Amino acid sequence: MTNLELQKRKEKAIARGQGNLNPIFIDHAKNAELWDVEGKRYIDFGAGIAVVNTGHVNNRITKSATDQLGKFVHAGFMITPYEAGVELAEKLNELVPIEDAKTMIVSTGAEAVENAIKIAKAYTKRSGVIAFHGGFHGRTHMGLGLTGKISPYKKGFGPFPNNIFHVPFPIPYYNITIEDSFRAMKNLFTSTISPDDVAAIILEPVQGEGGFNIAPPEFLSKLRELCTAHGILLICDEIQTGFARTGTFFATEQYGIEPDLMTLAKGLAGGFPLSAVVGKREIMDASENLGGTFAGSPVACAAALEVIDIIKSENLCDRANEIGKIVTQRLLDLQNEHSDVIGNVRNKGAMIAVEFVKNGDPDTPNPELAKAIVKKASENGLIILMCGIRGNAIRILTPLTIDNQILDEGLRILEESIVGLLKTKEYEKSYGH
C-alpha cells in the first residue's frame, strides 16, 4: 500500500476536518526517526506535537506499558482505582511549583483545560475567564472559546461559551508590550467585567500554536500580583511546555511564581493519551464531581511514571537546553545570511521557532514561504510543523533523546530546504517580495 493509496482511503473514510499536514503514512518509528509505508526514512522535528519528548518506542516506556497491559487495561479510576494512578498523582504533586498540591487525571489536553475552568468556577463562585490573543487551549467548545486564534480553529464554530475575554499577549517582536497587555486588562475591568466576577486568567508561559511567544518574566510576576489582589485564579497551561521541553520540568519554574492551577498533557505519558490538572489543595477540592470513563488510563499512568523517571535519570532538562542552543545558533547563522526573509528566531529550551517575513518587516508575514518550507522539508526527509497566529512560523520540537548526529542531519535538511527554495525561480513569484 502506498502513501497515495492510503491518502485516498483516508479522504473517503475520515471527515475532511481531521486533515493531515503531510500525505505520509507511518509504518514504524524509533527515537527521532520515522519510516513510512513505502520505506522512506524521515527525521522527526515535530515529536507528535511535543508528545514524544522521550522518543518514539522508548524501550523503558514500552516495557512499563506492556507489563500493565498484562494485568488489566481498564477498570475505571472512579470505580476501582489502582496504584499507578495514585503514584502518578503523588509524583506530579511533588514536581509542580505549587505548594501542597493535589491532582486529577484525565485523557487529553482539552479535557484538562475544561476541568481546570470548572474547578476555578467552583472554587471562586465566579463565571468570567480571561485568556490571551494567540493562546491555544484545545478544540472542545470551551477550549476554542479560550483560544485566541480564529483560523483555522474557531471559524464556523461559534458562538462560544459566554464570559470569556481576550487581551493582548506581550510579544516584543510585534511591539506589543507588557504595558499594552495590562492597559487592555484595566480597560476590560472598567468597561466589560468587574475583576470580582473573574474566576481565572489562563495562559501558556510559552504560547504553542500561537508561535512560541515567550512570556516576559516581569509579565508573569505582575499577572500573579494582579490575580492575588483580586482573588482571581492563575492557570498556567503547560500542555506543550511541560515535561522538560523548555529546560525545566515545567516552564513556570523559570518564572519564580506559584500558579493556582496547571494543565498538563502531551509529553506526560510518552505517546499514550493522558492529561492532568494539578493545583492547590483547597482549590482542587472545591468540586465534588470530576472525572470521566477513560480518565487516567492505567496503561498511560504506567507509561507516565516511566517518563518522569527517564527525564530525571537521563537529564533531559539539561538536554533540552543543549538542543535549544545548537538549533538556535544554526538558525541565527541562517538569519544572518537571509535577514530579509527570516525575521525572528526564538526559543525556550528545545521549544524553538523561526518566523518568516517579507523584506525583513515584522508586519509583513510570509505564511506562504513557511508552508512551502514545510512541504519541501518533508520531501527531503524532515518532518517540521507550522505555527503562529499569522501562520508564518515554523516550530522545531525534536524528541529530547535525539542523537546529535541525527539532529545535525535534520538541521542540514532544514537549511537546504530553506536556501533551496530561496534560489528557485518560483520563489520571487510565489513567496517573495
Image (tube, grey):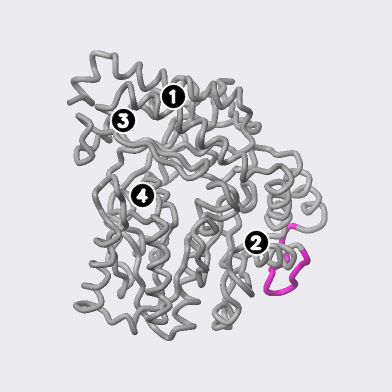
> For mark 1, does the 10 Å Cα neighbourhood hold few (<14), some (14 to 19), or many (20 or more) residues?
many
Which of the image's four quarters has the C terminus? top left
Residue 45 position, x and y percent, is 51, 33
The quadrant in which residue 399 appears is: top right
Q: Any magenta on residue 76? A: yes
Three-letter residue code for mark 4: Gly
| Secondary element at image label 3 | strand
347 lies left or right of 178: right
Residue 121 lies, with reference to residue 74, above or below; the image says below
Cα separation, mark 1 vs mark 3, equals 13 Å
- Give the mark nearest the N terminus, 2 or 3: 2
Q: Comparing marks 1 and 2, which lies closer to the viewer? A: 2
In the image, which residues are magenta? 73-83
The residue carrying mark 3 is 342
Within 10 Å of the Cα at label 4, are there few (<14), some (14-19), or many (20+) other Cα atoms? many
Badge 4 element: loop
Spatial distance from mark 2 to mark 3, Cα to Cα? 37 Å
> Counting residues from the N terminus, which is met first, the one under dot 2 or under dot 4?
2
How many residues crowd mark 2 within 10 Å: few (<14), some (14–19), many (20+)? some
